[in-house]
Amino acid sequence: MLKIPIKTQNITSLRQSDIQKIRQDFPILNTTVHGKPLVYFDNANTPQKPQVVIDSVNDIYTKYYSSVHRGVHCLSEKSTRLFEISRDKVQNFISAKHREEIIFVRGTTEAINLVAQSFARPQLKPDDEILMTTMEHHANIIPWQMVCGQTGAKLKVVPINDNGEIIFEEFIKLLNPRTKLLAVVHVSNSLGTINPIEKMIEAAHQQNIPVLIDGAQAVVHQKVDVRKSDCDFYAFSGHKLYGPSGIGVLYGKKALLEAMPPYQGGGNMISQVTFEKTIYNTLPYKFEAGTPHIAGVIGLGAAIDYIDNIGLDKISRYEKYLLDYATQSMQEFSDIRIIGSAQKKASILSFIFEHIHAHDVGTILDQEGIAIRTGHHCTMPLMARFNVPATARASFAFYNTIEEIDVFLQGLKKIKEVFHV
Ligand code: PMP
């Protein structure tokens, strides 16, 4: 295979023997696709689930299932206890100060919509501004566009350079007394760029501007500490963190959440109801109307235990090793352009083949058993910035291997053969 010198694997990273053991934890990784062993490089979209997560969801339905917070019987007490233990796990995972700052929602998308409607909408006035960046996911654009439509506020966008990094001086220039919120992605799902959120939060706070961080891609690759970064809101999804889909987290500073009106009305979010008036429940339940995704919450707790057990430090070093190997190896292809070459990057590799559409790249790789994502990755304005309709994106998780990257590189060669380029 390609003989490209790369830095030897950091000794504090995961070793080959660790990876082989880890791979046994993910039953789907033994699957074949079109008769070839599955190479799963669509992890930024959604990664596969370890057996402990699958077991925990299975256990809930086979051993403990009941509704939470409302029953006095044994099963309800047990499921409520496991549900609330998961909240503690999330609190520790992101180093939040209070457990009631952890709100369970459907995912990053719902978390951002909640902040847009409950936090921003009541205070926005015409000509106020919401500041974001060019590399936002649609989930961190459209809720703000909607709230701007409802209030007359305006969206302002921080430009990025050709490497896919925020132009910091331009960001500073855009902060002004009309800016009512900064909403920024921690790690770009399309480029892999890790944004300097601590510096951005500090600059925004100097002007009393609250900050929401879209952490959908960040929590899987690095330790997130909401107290250290001092963000006001942090949103992420369980399915990106090796947990179930349909569950996610909104972290918010307690004082802000307390001052916000509920997002949805219904059961669980109340303490007293008459036809004349409702007294809302305390945090976090004020924002958790209706029967929650019980198995999702408990499965997310199992996923956090699993990740903690391996260690995010080791995970991020190993994933960087995979990214460096793939990036360097792809230099051999003169007709491939990598989109996103920020100095600080997570293990996300977007690229385009000159003269070959990304969808063709994805389809041919699929025939080789390799799953990647192709398209605009829900970042159409970012695609426009790079003047491309779509990219192909390989994204690596800690269960991937150098050998799989070699299979992927062979797949790229095959694409060239098929298209005679
Ligand atoms: N933000 C980013 C950066 C993402 O990558 C995603 C998912 N691709 C989202 C937000 C939305 O997450 P979800 O669909 O889980 O709500």
Image (tube, rainbow, N blue to C red):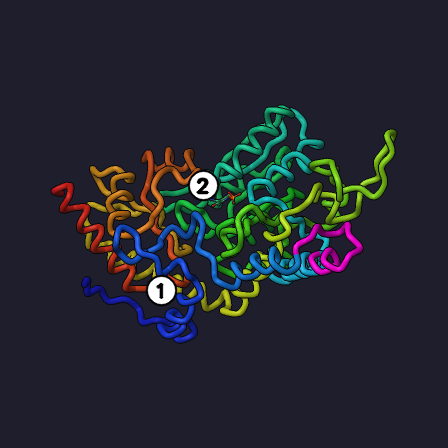
Residue sitting at x 61%, y 53%: 295
Q: Is mark 1 on a helix, strand or loop?
A: helix
Beta carbon at label 1 within 8 Å of ligand 1: no
Q: Where is residue 48 in the image (x, y as percent from the top left)?
A: 44, 55
Mark 2 → mark 1, Cα distance in angstroms = 24 Å
Magenta segment, principal secondary structure?
Answer: loop
Location of residue 60 with respect to 114 vertically, above or below:
below
Label 2 or label 1, whichever comes before in sequence order: 2
**Residue at image location 51% in from the left, 46% down from the top:** 185
150, above or below 221, in the image: above
Residue 338 appears anywhere in the view: yes
- Residue 195 visible, this angle: no
Residue 129 percent location from the top left of the image: 60, 32
Q: Nearer the viewer, mark 2 or mark 1?
A: 1
Q: Name the residue under label 2.
A: 135
Query: Is residue 71 a member of the stretch shown in magenta?
Result: yes
Identify residue type, mark 2: Met
> Would you call the spot at circle 1 few (<14 residues within 10 Å), some (14-19), or many (20 or more)?
many
Q: Which residue lies furthest to the front in this view?
A: 62
Give me the disc on residue 321: 1
The type of residue carrying mark 1 is: Tyr
Q: Please report the residue visible at 39 percent of the width from the left and 47 percent of the height from the top.
A: 191
Vertical relation: 405 (above or below) 138? below
Q: Nearer the viewer, residue 220 or 213?
A: 220
**Is 24 in the magenta?**
no
User: Foreground residue, 178 or 95?
Assistant: 95
User: The C terminus appears in which quarter of the rendering?
Assistant: top left
Q: In the drawing, does residue 332 fall left or right of residue 307?
A: left
| Region in magenta | 65-79
Quadrant of the image containing the N terminus? bottom left
- Residue at x 22%, y 50% (from the top left corner): 412
